[in-house]
Image (cartoon, coloured by chain):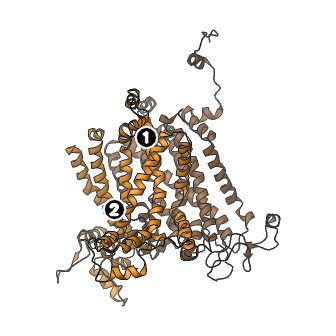
Chain colours: A brown, B orange
Amino acid sequence: MAETVPTGDNSLLKETISVRKIGWLERFLGPENYRIVKGLMKTPASIAGFSLILLFALIAIFAPVIIPPVGSDPYKIPRDGFKSDPRPMGSEWKRNAPEIPFWYKAVTGKDEWVHLLGTSEGQYDIFYGIIWGTRTAFKTGLLVTLSTLIIGVVYGSIAAYYGKWVDNLMMRIVDVISILPGILVAMILAAVLIPKFGKSTIPVMIALIAFGWMGYARFIRADILSVKERDYVLAARVVGVKDSRILFKHILPNAIFPTLILASLAIGDVVLSFAALSFLGIGVEIGYADWGQVISFARNWITSLNTYWYIVVWPGLTLVLFVMGWNLLGDALRDVLDPRMRGKM
Amino acid sequence: MVNYIIRRLLLMPVLLFGVTVLIFGMLSFLEPTERLALYMRDFPKNPEAIPALIRKYDLDKPIYVQYWNWLVGKVDKATGERTGGIIFGDLGYSRSQSQPVIELIKRRFPNTVDLTIWAVAPIVFVGIWLGVQAAVHHNQLFDQVARVFSIVGTSFPTFVFGLLVLMIFYAQLHWLPPGRLSDEFMRVVESDAFRHYTSLLTFDALLNGRFDIFLDALRHMILPILTLSYINWATFLRLTRSSMLETLRMEYVTTARAKGLPEHDVIHKHAKPNAMLPVVTLAGFSVVGLLAGVVITETVFNYPGIGSAAARAATNLDVVAMLGFALFDGFILLVAVLVIDIMYAFIDPRVRLT
């Protein structure tokens, strides 16, 4: 390599001949994807988003330490009696109180459990619902997102790889499914499935999966269409590699990364839809530790919400912060992914 | 242009067929006894009559026979009477609200249209204004605040926001109640003296010269409109902002600036019209979305539109009614998408080439 760099302001040339170190991560992800990951690590919005999500992840993992489960099913919110009127924050927990965890006395300075965030209609403890609801949120969010991602990717890649009439037919089917009013058809499918599965998280999850994969199919299809024309795909075909092998070993690994990122950020939206359906009373049974379910207790107390504000504010705030964590990440991602905005922010 | 429209029109029956197949597919999950609600109002009291009724309406026949019956209805050979048939507007009976689904839609849909009419202007115009301002003040304070606002806006679930505004403006301040109309005005509206010209309540009130009823109806709609606006502004802001930023970087805008046009004219006369193209589509889809029934907003505010009817049917697992709503909504959406696409081809000459 020539050591004589021409004098004067020649930054472009300097950059060309400078030897940049390439780390293992960049080698692993490739320059394009590495740029995306690096961009996500840098912006303040995405760092705030990461922190929020991390906080919720910790709450979900340590739920039994924060508030030990009562009874055999930890997802059933313990009831302190059966009176309908909500009770305020800090009121005494008489029946079905959990064990005292180690942090409790140090933080609250009390010897017995109280209802830290009050109780909802029917004396369900709100704090318990929020903490264990975090687990429900992650569980449903991850499961639904993963399933929709797999369905969407397989469907979209098949359509894109075969092209022509296969593609046309498959994408028209996608059009038909996406034209249906989303939340309504999800509600219907859940309602149809409830008699078969009973009231649990399963019917709603199936409904959200059934009407949630079309976006990924479209997204991966567009990416594959551009990768498909590359020379190495042609080379593989010339050598006589099988269709399925070309698709899943050669094309997909090079096209899937943006879709993966998109999917990982959709968890917030999935949790939001799930909560919306629980709020409407579709899906889980009353008293299940799920944020939408906890908020739905407030529906009967609209005229006195000024007195019982805690039955909507705390679970509502939790849901908003959770979704906001994912949205902050998504916002940062949009900047990184949009090539027209590159270097202009 | 004509080709494009014809192609779109030809696709329409195909999509319509697809939608009906999907909806019927969900219907076939039900037990034959539950599907009886498609054809009869009341569930037979005598359980022994059920097998005969199932046979009468072919509910034990192959699925394509049932689909056909569902589409065009089942004609009784002896009397010549037709029952069912969605193409004739017979969507079956709602068990939870004990009336024909189509009647329910006829009664509830005008309320949803009323809400849509009053909600569209604040959503679209304020949303676009916010987006244009954010783009013009790119990376300045307004832009940053707008950005935070849009992230918070998209993170707020409708029902949480709705309950919070109800808590403040209804429970605490008693300003803006939920529902449709105050009781005393409801009695007036239901009496014979009140004539229903358009069946849209606000307009009927004005046509009847009852300004007090008009104001009361508006008062009940402010909170739903606020909720819908807040949720939608974020989307409008984001799209308008990025589209506007892109347009402002184009060379013709630089030319306009270079020839000495005032900045106001550059933004509002040169850049904005072109930047609005994608926003027009979004506006179209938002209107359709509102018309198709905003399930959660209407439920939270106890607003008697088509969305809250669907939610009520859903909690009672009244699937036949819900499918009726879905079919109705699906039809509206199909027609609207067609209209939006064709309109778009008129506005944007680039579309016609593809």
Q: Chain of mark 1?
A: B
Q: Is residue B138 above or below residue A54?
A: above
Question: Hey, which quadrant is residue B324 in on the image?
Answer: bottom left
Q: Is residue A154 visible?
A: no
> If you read the primary sequence from the N terminus, does the residue marked by circle 1 or circle 2 appear first?
1
Amino acid marked by disc 2 = Gly
In-image side of A108 versus A174 (left or right): right
Percent across and percent down for residue A58 are 69, 56
Question: Hey, which quadrant is residue B55 in on the image?
Answer: bottom left
SS of the residue under disc 1: helix
Q: Residues within 10 Å of mark 2 (few under 14, many from 20)?
A: many
**x 17%, y 83%: residue:** B79
Q: Nearer the viewer, residue B135 or A11?
A: B135
Q: Chain of mark 2?
A: B
Q: Nearer the viewer, residue A254 or B157?
A: B157
Q: Is residue B151 visible?
A: yes
SS of the residue under disc 2: helix
Q: Residues within 10 Å of mark 1 (few under 14, many from 20)?
A: many
Would you name the residue on which mark 2 appears?
B330
Would you name the residue on which mark 1 appears?
B244
Question: Hey, which quadrant is residue A137 in on the image?
Answer: bottom right
